[in-house]
Image (tube, grey):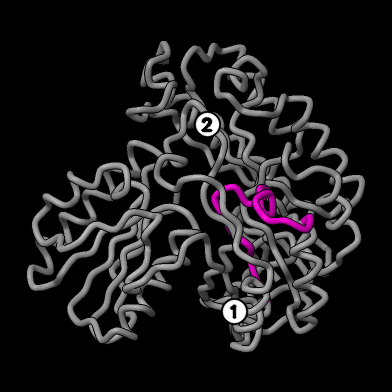
Amino acid sequence: MSAPSLPRALADGVETVTLGCRLNMVESEELARQAKASGERGLAIVNTCAVTAEALRRSRQAVRRLGRERPSSRILVTGCAATLYAADFAAMPGVERVIANDHKTLAPDPRSGTRAVAAAEGTRGFLAVQNGCDHRCTFCVIPFGRGASRSAPPDEVLREARALASSGKREIVLTGVDLTAYGLDIRDGWTLPRLARMLLAELPEIARLRFSSIDCIEAGLELIDAMAQESRLAPHLHLSLQAGDDLILKRMKRRHSRHDAVDFCRRLREARPETVLGADLIVGFPTETEAMFQRTLDLVEDCGLTHLHVFPFSPRPGAPAAAMPQVDGETVLARAAQLRALGEQQLRRHLRAQRGKTLRVLAERGGRARAEDFTLVRTPGAEPGTIFDVFVTGDDGRLLLS
């Protein structure tokens, strides 16, 4: 989960505060556009998250802060936390309306199904092509907040992607709750790799197409083939792995084994050797022993992971894992710190390996650029949106230097 954005004036007194995933960020911008089109004034939109107990706490904190600091604003609350705890948010001072995820629109007659929704962040465009989830991992309440998996129609995805390209975006990121489930609810054999190939063929002006978080067991060989054959598909994937021990994966109700994860990463690297991988990992899941945790530590090396998103387990009311035997809180935090330290070590190793290489980068704001494999490069003075080659001279432990 990312940190909440600060209130941001987007249009004539309409502000947004966004917590959680990229999908929320995309939807926040769409809500702000709708508010502008309908002439809203003095409106604050809080898009909440419920992926962890901390996310829920920060969502409530954001609404309370707006109520104190902007007493004249009308507050609209939406997102997963608002969907799951609608009555709690509706009772907060200043909240005028709570909108559930399946009605996340200000339009008077919301369309059924899932629309492709686009948003821009600097030089990249984000395109939400899928929503919801049909799986029931025992630690997760997001399916209850997002509903069943739905895919946006391919022609609508193309239309939104073309609009992003026309606005000057050189890179598009495809996002969703369960992105690799794209197309399962659409006839005619649509899949995420097929969608990506279509966008690349129809939009030659797009320099890069990138996937957000994916499920390795759903991705399969078709995605690996697309990564190998389409040079404009960014050689970077973020995997929803969660753990490295088979028994913990089973208790999580994940659909992949440790072998599946390691094998997917191996096959992907054989097909596209320059690929850089990240992963979501949960530590301190109920019943996790030191030996089980060690297998998650080992997974980082076995899969060759570079970017880690580490989540200390927190029980979510209504999720089956909340009723399982819990790991001591201090142990959970200690394991999270250990795994994060390993992640920092992996990142430093990756950065050192880039020294002396020439990388093609896309300049972002703030004197930074991003390589095709998602590595950040310090490029002071570069014009945002430009693509150019840099020679890597070293690193500062977080970014490459050129």
In this view, the residue in front, 293 or 1, is 1
Q: Specify which label sits upstream in the sequence, 2 or 1.
A: 2
Task: Identify the residue at image location x=39%, y=38%.
Answer: 52
Contact check, label 2 and label 1, Cβ < 8 Å: no
| Residue under pointer 2 | 136
In the rendering, at what x and y percent does residue 364 appear?
A: 58, 76
275 over 392 or under it: above or below: above
Q: Is residue 220 left or right of residue 384?
A: right
In the rendering, at what x and y percent does residue 373 appear?
A: 73, 60
Q: Which quadrant would residue 17 be assigned to in this image? A: bottom left
Near mark 2 (Cα within 10 A), the count class, few <14, some 14-19 or many ≥20, is some
Q: Which quadrant would residue 45 be assigned to in this image? A: bottom left
In the rendering, at what x and y percent does residue 384 appear?
A: 59, 83
Task: Identify the residue at image location x=33%, y=54%.
Answer: 100
Which amino acid, mark 1?
Pro
The verdict on residue 165 being magenta is: no
296 over 171 or under it: above or below: above
Q: Is residue 121 visible to us here?
A: no
Q: CA distance from mark 2 to mark 1?
A: 46 Å
Q: Which labelled disc corresponds to residue 17?
A: none
The verdict on residue 179 being magenta is: yes
Secondary structure found at label 1: loop
Which amino acid, mark 2?
Arg
Q: Is residue 211 left or right of residue 392?
A: left
Q: Which labelled disc corresponds to residue 380?
A: 1
In the image, the segment drawn in magenta is 171-189
25 over 39 or under it: above or below: above
**Quadrant into which the C terminus falls:** bottom right
Task: Identify the residue at image location x=8%, y=56%.
Answer: 93
369 over 282 or under it: above or below: below
